[in-house]
Amino acid sequence: TSRNHKRNDHNQWELEQYQKAQQIMNTTKITKDDLDKVNLPDNDKYEYVFDDSQYVNFNEIEEDDELKGDDQPQKPDLIEKERISIAEVRQSLPVYKFRSHFLEAMDKNQVLIVVGETGSGKTTQLPQYLYEAGYSQGDKNLIIGCTQPRRVAATSVATRVAQEMNVKLGKEVGYSVRFDDKSSKDTVIKYLTDGMLLREFLTDSKLLKYSVIMIDEAHERTLSTEILLSLLKDILTTRHDLKVIIASATINAEKFSNYFHQASILNIPGRRFPVKIHYTKNPEANYIQAAITTIFQIHLTQPLPGDILVFLTGQEEIESMEESLQESIIKLGSSLENHLQVLSIYSNLPIDLQKKIFEPTLPHTRKVILATNIAETSITIDGISYVIDPGYVKQNVYNPTQAMESLVVVPCSKASVDQRAGRAGRIGPGKCFRLFTKWSYYNELDANTTPEILRVNLSSVILLLLSLGINDLINFDFLDKPNSKHIIKSLELLYSLGCINSKGSLTKLGLKLSKFPLDPMLSKCLITSEKFNCVLEIITIISMLGESSTLFYRPKDKQEIASKKHASFDSPLGDHFSLLNVSQQWENSDFSNQWCQEYFVQYKTLRRVKNVRDQLIKLCQRNKINVNETISINPLYIQKSLISGYFPNIVKLSMMGDTYKKLKSSNVATPCYIHPSSSIFKIKPIPKLLLYHELVLTSKEYMRNCMIIDEKLIKEYGSHYYSPQELESLSKTKK
Ligand code: CDP
Ligand code: MG
């Protein structure tokens, strides 16, 4: 039969892969001595304590026996799984059994809550079931929309579903994320970020293009998702033909049901195997090192197949760990019996690299996937048996007293680390290694993650609500009401940017700003730049700022020359101008890849920057903002445009001359430091006044991307924001 034929082909392929893998590795066994030769951060094995009171998901174990006898994870043959067709894979997912049940419930209810374990098939299957059942067929094609809190989730799921439906991505199945739209008039299943759907309200306030909206990952409680729920609740009263699905992991379901007048809940039990939880005996000072050691420990002592998933806080951390791992792997070389393949996933990862993590693991190989929180629930990677969890996550945290938002690495909640552990038990029993103590789990971790609406800067969302005509924020039907202090601070900021008047209503300028999917402070710079004829430069700077942390690289053996090349971009005015230099020089090279290599600049990053820039240019043109190319721009105009939006982010050198202090004196005086990556980090004399783009809180409060600014400009653009005393203090900084 053709199936058998395929099987033979596959065996041939498998054999080749196996031979390739054989070439990579050597079969000699690893000894303790080999390990010692490797410069592992810690040659002592980590001792874990096993918590036998805790089996995550123990209740739904399918085969009890699996834990008895050998307690090693047992896994179905992954290659075997690869052989079965897409149709068979679809039918093997837990949601499949509930297909008719689900469609019936959709027929009966306007709002349906779907609760199911991660990986059960909600995101990829439910929209397809609706499409197959005819939900997209109205007078004209209607869209089945599915929102995701993260862009990688939206793009990767759309890719997968297009593949399952055997259509070209962007045709029947598409996605739409900020600055990247792969949908067309043929699109009937559309995956989009929650933020994008929110913006669609601006042009289609009743979402008439949609027949069904699935709000996915609702348990994550992102700001945009929550605002969407409120807006949907409102339009449902007039759009009786619109259906809403709220999909969530097991947490929070009741809350959503209550909010939507006791909406029905459909439970989809997942396939869950027990996961043994291990803790470190002592608190880990350096979780990166601990994680690396644990990866090798697992790889050397645990059987194959069984991939490893490591939760890290961000792209930079992932990249540096990837580098150390590769180094250790090379050093271990032939002593590794099985190959260790390092892969990563984070929100900026290009689509072609995303696909790699979904490819089946080769024989005699173990994948180790370094992931951000995205792998907690949004993305399911098959084949994981081991989870390493340092227990941290990077969050945006807003401090209303300081009116400051900063990126902070914080400990995860219990709910979150339990979700992470569950990722090890999807296809067989698994193990989770927590790089913190059992005591800390029970005594230190919060039960749940604080919803974003309670902790972030609300100015973007408030501006959006105002431009939708929602003026009464106090009586707005929030799922959880944000702190009124946060609302007031955000209104104050919008007022000082000129977006609202003293009565709190939207101004013309405010309306203009709301057209841009940017932070209002950035949109303000853009609008001001029109007056100075430097729109293109400001757009370029804005696009570069968003990607600046992954722009430069320095190979280990060429550090010096790379640093020199990087320094050639430095502008005495600061990072905004240095970034502009990079972009302009790249453009002069005709966007060449070779130029990037020569200057140790990431080509991929610049491609992304260019894409964002092109989108912003289009948006400006659509909003009748003049984007003319000007021959030579007075840098002062660029500075003026930037300070018109960023006047709240000004610091002055302290009296001692060693740190910076926020100019707004009502703010708590945490000292700020110039980020070491800044082009003015070592500039002499030390600049007295700086404008910074963002604060990153690690061991210290670092200002990333700084521009040198003078007193006159602050007085010109900040006099409505700073008190006379604060402005006076400008001339009293260290001379
Ligand atoms: O949404 P939920 O967590 O319930 O599951 P899903 O994302 O629909 O995933 C269902 C299956 O599709 C899993 O086995 C995933 O590994 C697979 N999938 C994939 O192979 N490639 C993707 N880009 C997304 C999902
Ligand atoms: Mg999902």
Image (cartoon, grey):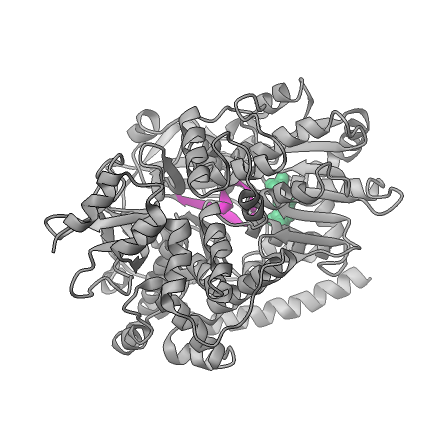
Which quarter of the image is occupied by the C terminus? bottom left
Q: Residue at x 36, y 64 (%)?
A: 636
Q: Which residues are magenta?
A: 374-388
Q: How many marks?
A: 0
Task: State left or right for residue 63 relative to residue 169.
Answer: left
> Does the magenta portion include 385?
yes
Q: Residue at x 71, y 66 (%)?
A: 8
> Does the magenta portion include 368?
no
Q: Is residue 383 above or below residue 569?
A: above
* Coordinates of residue 370 in the picture (x, y in percent): 43, 53
Q: Is residue 319 visible?
A: yes
Q: Residue at x 63, y 69 (%)?
A: 13
Which of 8 and 262 lies nearest the eye of the viewer?
262
Task: State left or right for residue 318 relative to residue 268.
Answer: left
* Coordinates of residue 318 in the picture (x, y in percent): 39, 56
Locate residue 4: give its quadrant: bottom right
